Image: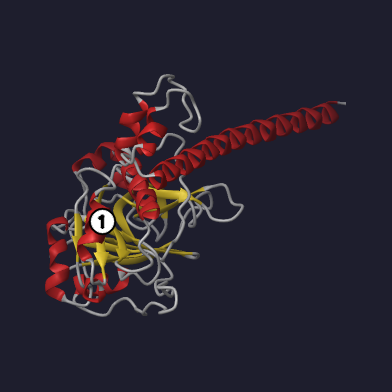
Amino acid sequence: MSLTYSLHQLGWRPDYAQHLTLDDFESGHPARVMAVHRSGLIVFSSRGEDAVVLPHNVDAGSGVAVGDWVLVSHEADRVLRVLERHSVLERMAAGGDRRCQPIAANLDALFVVSSCNDDFNPSRLERYLALAFDAGIAPVIVLTKVDLCDDIGGYMATAEGLAIGVPVVALNAMDAHSVSQLEPWLGPGRTVALVGSSGVGKSTITNGLLGENTQHTAGIREDDARGRHTTTAREMFSTASGAWVIDTPGMRELRLASVNPELDEVFGDVASLAEQCRFSDCHHEDDAGCAVVRAISAGVLDARRLDSYRKLLREAAHAQRTVREQREMGRQFGAMARKAMRGKRDRVGR
């Protein structure tokens, strides 16, 4: 017998109903996506757990994410449509694929996990923070492996300096009492996701929150402090507190998918200095009167931080070009299709 949850327990918000009509409720019922597979989805609703299939026009890899709400038909185990999200964490797909790829949807908080060893990378943390802010999700930096670290204070200070107001929690993922520091973000019906490189302890934290070894774990390699991939798919789990946790595969690089990322939330110091530059279009390189370059020379700003800011700006520009290219390709394809249809009608009319 499958477990049943009320919509409230699943994280339903009253404003979701604003996007549903009376016809929608007569034809289907809301359900939340727990797992995404090539063949379909695993969803939970007030009716229990179900395996459902997607419409042909919805791609399981890019059109739906764990945490999404969908409308499931009363008549068959199939999705009628994906409901509007209140937040979605997404990235530009890896490789040559230029599509935006959703990682998780309808999140209340994002645990950005990094270990206190050679894997700790401030620039990567800034990237995750930018993704969270851009999605409208509250980030929390979680530092792991503190039991193996002699300089926890140094890691904490660096993490706290990345973005004003972002909480930083240092813990031992193997210790239940230590993991309990995350409880303030795990209220009933709330949804959090964990992101970070392989081996930093995401699955161990997930197991600690669930109180069972649901996720397989593996240690890091001692030679380079990098981890082995243990989680291979995104899936949502219920915790004892009534919250929902999404563990994600280790991703060392997440390319920004937004054309206007909220970088000022992460790089407020750089943005503040940029306002003091002589020219509004200053590139912060060798421009005359550049306050940012002057701050680096004076030791007020870390050059690494500016490099990270520039890199994310370049990715945003690339995403913007990609969107324009996709629109142009769609326009050209539409023109070709219309031309072909006109040619067909002309031949028939002869």
Query: Front-most of 267 and 320?
Result: 267
Q: Give the vertical position of 50 relative to 69 (above or below).
A: below
Q: Is residue 254 left or right of residue 68?
A: right
Residue 153, image x, y percentages: 20, 61
Looking at the rendered structure, the kind of residue marked 1 is Ile
Residue assigned mark 1? 141
Q: Quadrant of the N terminus?
A: bottom left
Query: Front-most of 124 and 297?
Result: 297
Residue 248, image x, y percentages: 37, 64
Residue drawn 38% across the image and 77% down it: 220
Query: Front-most of 263 and 245?
Result: 263
Residue drawn 36% across the image and 62% down it: 196
Residue at the extreme front: 298
Q: Give the vertical position of 81 relative to 280 (above or below).
A: below
Looking at the rendered structure, the secondary structure element under dot 1 is strand
Q: Give the vertical position of 142 relative to 283 (above or below).
A: below
Q: Is residue 58 left or right of residue 156?
A: right
Residue drawn 34% across the image and 23% down it: 276
Q: Can residue 70 be seen in this view?
A: no
Query: Front-most of 305 and 136?
Result: 305
